[in-house]
């Protein structure tokens, strides 16, 4: 019986080359679907766009955080400048000048300080006057991180001790500031309105300009002249007829 070869015989899968070997027939590579290619490209594009968007959001968040930090630094500089420019210690004028110089920049304030130092020393030396400033409120009303400039409004009180008595005032100031190597310094300072006198803690309510209290039971001379320097209440009604005065009021 003659043996037969199965169709699955590996010898039949190749081509006889004549030297006892067979050459295999190459298998065709699988073809990529156009739809799959498009999906892959779209996914890559979406990934790229997402990365760009995340980078933009990160940059904006970083810039916002950086600006917030700079604004805090500018406000701190405004507060310190307001304190240094309104504090005086006649017992240590060198420190007073050093503190002022550390908080100012630009020709206007620098030249102004240099031009008045001698006069300042003559006015305050050996007077025993000490003025201490404290900030009550401060805010930025303008800020530019690109220019390194800011504007601030500061409300502060100044307490002055001197041999003939103490004083307390409230002032409002507008400061223009410049970033100098990371330190915010004043380039201009402008008072807003007038200083407001405040009651000094622990001091009697009456001031040196106040009229001494009078005895309400004491008789009043209608013909007594009125003190023209006495304070006048603008809200008090005016009596067209001559009226007795009370202690020059």
Image: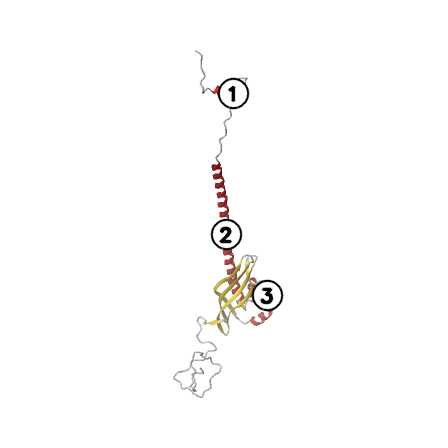
Q: Position of residue 196 (x, y in %)?
A: 48, 71
Front one among 210 and 50:
50
Q: Quadrant of residue 127?
A: bottom right
Q: Residues within 10 Å of mark 3 (few under 14, many from 20)?
A: few
Q: Nearer the N terminus, badge 2 or badge 1?
A: 1
> Picture coordinates of residue 37 (x, y %)?
49, 37
Q: Nearer the viewer, mark 2 or mark 1?
A: 1
Judging depth in this view, the residue of 61 and 232 nearest the camera is 61
Q: CA distance from mark 2 to mark 1?
A: 68 Å
Badge nearest the viewer, 2 or 3: 2
Q: Is residue 18 above or below residue 237?
A: above
Tag 3's secondary structure? Answer: helix
Q: Which residue is the site of mark 2?
A: 60
Between 220 and 44, the one nearer to me in the picture: 44
Residue ID at (49%, 39%): 38
First of labels 3, 1 by sequence position: 1
State which mark lies toward you, 3 or 1: 1
**Numbered tag placed on residue 155 in the rendering:** none
In the rendered image, which residue does mark 3 sit on? 108
Q: Secondary structure at mark 2?
A: helix
Task: From the image, tell me which residue sits under label 1.
Answer: 15
Spatial CA distance of label 3 from label 1 is 100 Å
Q: Residue furthest left?
A: 217
Q: Quadrant of the N terminus?
A: top left
Protein image colouring: secondary structure
The CA span between labels 2 and 3 is: 37 Å
N-terminal-most mark, 2 or 3: 2
Instruction: List the single residue furthest toward the bottom.
Output: 223
């Amino acid at each position: 019986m003659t043996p037969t070869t199965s169709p699955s015989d590996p010898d039949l899968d190749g081509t006889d080359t004549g030297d006892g070997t067979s050459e295999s027939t190459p298998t065709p590579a699988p073809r990529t679907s156009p739809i799959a290619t498009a999906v892959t490209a779209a996914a890559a594009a979406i990934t790229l766009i997402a990365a760009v968007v995340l980078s933009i959001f990160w940059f904006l968040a970083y810039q916002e955080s950086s600006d917030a930090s700079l604004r805090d630094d500018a406000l701190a500089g405004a507060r310190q400048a307001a304190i240094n420019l309104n504090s005086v210690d006649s017992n240590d004028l060198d420190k007073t000048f050093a503190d002022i110089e550390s908080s100012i920049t630009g020709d206007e304030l620098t030249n102004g300080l240099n031009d008045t130092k001698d006069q300042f020393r003559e006015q305050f030396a050996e007077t025993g006057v000490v003025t201490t400033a404290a900030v009550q409120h401060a805010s930025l009303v303008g800020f530019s991180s690109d220019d390194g400039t800011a504007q601030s409004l500061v409300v502060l009180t100044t307490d002055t001790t001197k041999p003939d008595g103490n004083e307390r005032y409230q002032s409002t100031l507008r400061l223009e500031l410049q970033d100098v190597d990371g330190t915010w310094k004043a380039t201009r300072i402008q008072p807003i309105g007038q200083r407001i006198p405040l009651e000094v803690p622990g001091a009697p309510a009456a001031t040196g300009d106040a009229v001494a209290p009078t005895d309400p039971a004491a008789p009043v001379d209608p013909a007594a002249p009125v003190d023209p320097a006495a304070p006048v209440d603008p809200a008090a009604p005016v009596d067209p007829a001559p009226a007795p005065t009370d202690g020059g009021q």
